[in-house]
Image (spheres, rainbow, N blue to C red):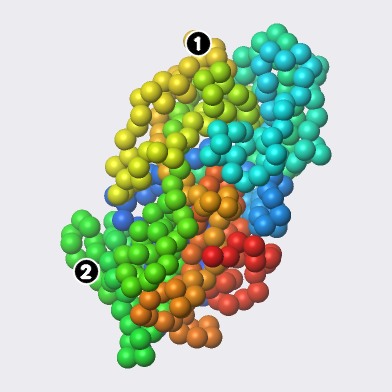
Amino acid sequence: MATSKTVILGTGIIGLSTAYYLSDSISPSSIHLVDPSPELFASASGRAAGFLAKDWFSSPLAALGALSFEEHKRLAEKENGRENWGYMRSTGVSYTPGLTGGRRTKRERGEDWLRQDASRADAANESVSELLAGNEEEAGPRWLSRSEGDAMELIGEQGTTAQVDPLRLCQFLLKSCLDRGVQLHHPARAISVGKDMRDELSSIRILNTDTQAVTDIPCTKILISAGAWSPQVFSALFPDSRTGLPISSLAGHSIVVRSQKWSKEHEEQGCHAVFTTDSSGYSPEIFSRMGEEIYIAGLNSSVIPLPKLATESELNQRSIDTLKKTAERLLGADGFEVVREGLCFRPVTNRGTPVLSRIEDAKLGNISTRGNEGGGVWLAAGHGPWGITNSLGTGKVMSEMIMRKKTSVDISGLGL
């Protein structure tokens, strides 16, 4: 009989967060992390902006967003997040060039702004929008090149937005899990599942893609948290299932720059998240982070195909050039140095909110799982641009679901 081991497929920030919380409650050595990418955190988990918000979400996601924001704060206070992964308070502002005293035109609030080339600022709580005026510091970050007649609007209450470096946060979570005894299989790909005489899930077979060694891990619980690759993982393990996971990918280019306008001295004043518009037809997002970095993104595409592995992503130079032109406009032509160019693939759903749910046995094909607390297959994916901010809350509730406990917040609106 298989021991009650849990295998987490995908070692991005969602899988790691779940393993981190789960290892607080069960034997860490019974938790296995599996990831096929030769380089961990090569997509959204390592190359996203790291912006955190507490109350920028519609009702199905609101409770999870608030929980996750508080978990980020709690973890940072406990583990010195400021030094270890750049956790810092942030001020969110909407910047509209060339409009004297004008407010931004707010679109209808919804979760699908990312696909519509709209601004994340449209998701902010309108009740806290406040037109800024006065001296330079009050009106926004000093690193932003201002123009006459522009407008800047505060779009976050004090203490409801923050900033992290997602790569460093993932590295911290992974080290913490491994130090506790969680087992990592990397680079390794899950290729099939095994069942016992009752046709119940009893093992998972993984292939080490470096050595070609095949290993069977006894397990009764599987969490699929492979981001945009989750549908492929599910179909490979459950080929007889007629269910397709409702997760697709949305590509996003980014650059990380350094500027003399943003130094360690400036970091003491707090980070900024600036949301604006560009004449080329997209909505740039600019985030100052600890480590003297400024992250620029907002150029998204649903037509760039998802690569087999995150490390096989190919940058579109035209997109990178567009971001550089945005940097010139917002930081000054001689005011920055590009230190990294990136492309990541975010998992999205048509409804605009993630799926945090157990996958019913009836959807698995010709295999079932143990009842009671003994087994199950779960999915945690589809966070879109909110994967980093909602990571810790997701990890907490998914660990509770896997242990068949009552979740800390109501996520009934995030089912499959």
> Which amino acid does the dot numbered 2 rest on?
Val
Which residue is drawn at the image coordinates 37% and 49% (left, top)?
40
- For label 2, the SS is strand
Which residue is drawn at the image coordinates 33% and 73% (left, top)?
240
**Image vertical order of residue 254 relative to residue 60, above or below:** above
Q: Position of residue 52 (x, y in %)?
A: 62, 43
Answer yes or no: is residue 335 visible. Answer: no
Per the model, the C-alpha gap separating discs 1 and 2 is 53 Å
Q: Which residue is nearer to you in this view: 379 or 19?
A: 379
Q: Position of residue 230 (x, y in %)?
A: 41, 58
Q: Which quadrant of the rendered structure holds the C terminus?
A: bottom right
State the mark number for residue 333.
1
Q: Which residue is nearer to you in this view: 392 or 122?
A: 122
Q: Position of residue 35 (x, y in %)?
A: 35, 58
Point out the tag, 1 or 2, that comes first from the N-terminus.
2
Crowding around mark 2 (Cα neighbors within 10 Å: few <14, some 14 to 19, many 20+) is: some
- For label 1, the SS is loop
Q: Is residue 154 left or right of residue 253?
A: right
Residue topped by disc 2? 214
Crowding around mark 1 (Cα neighbors within 10 Å: few <14, some 14 to 19, many 20+) is: few
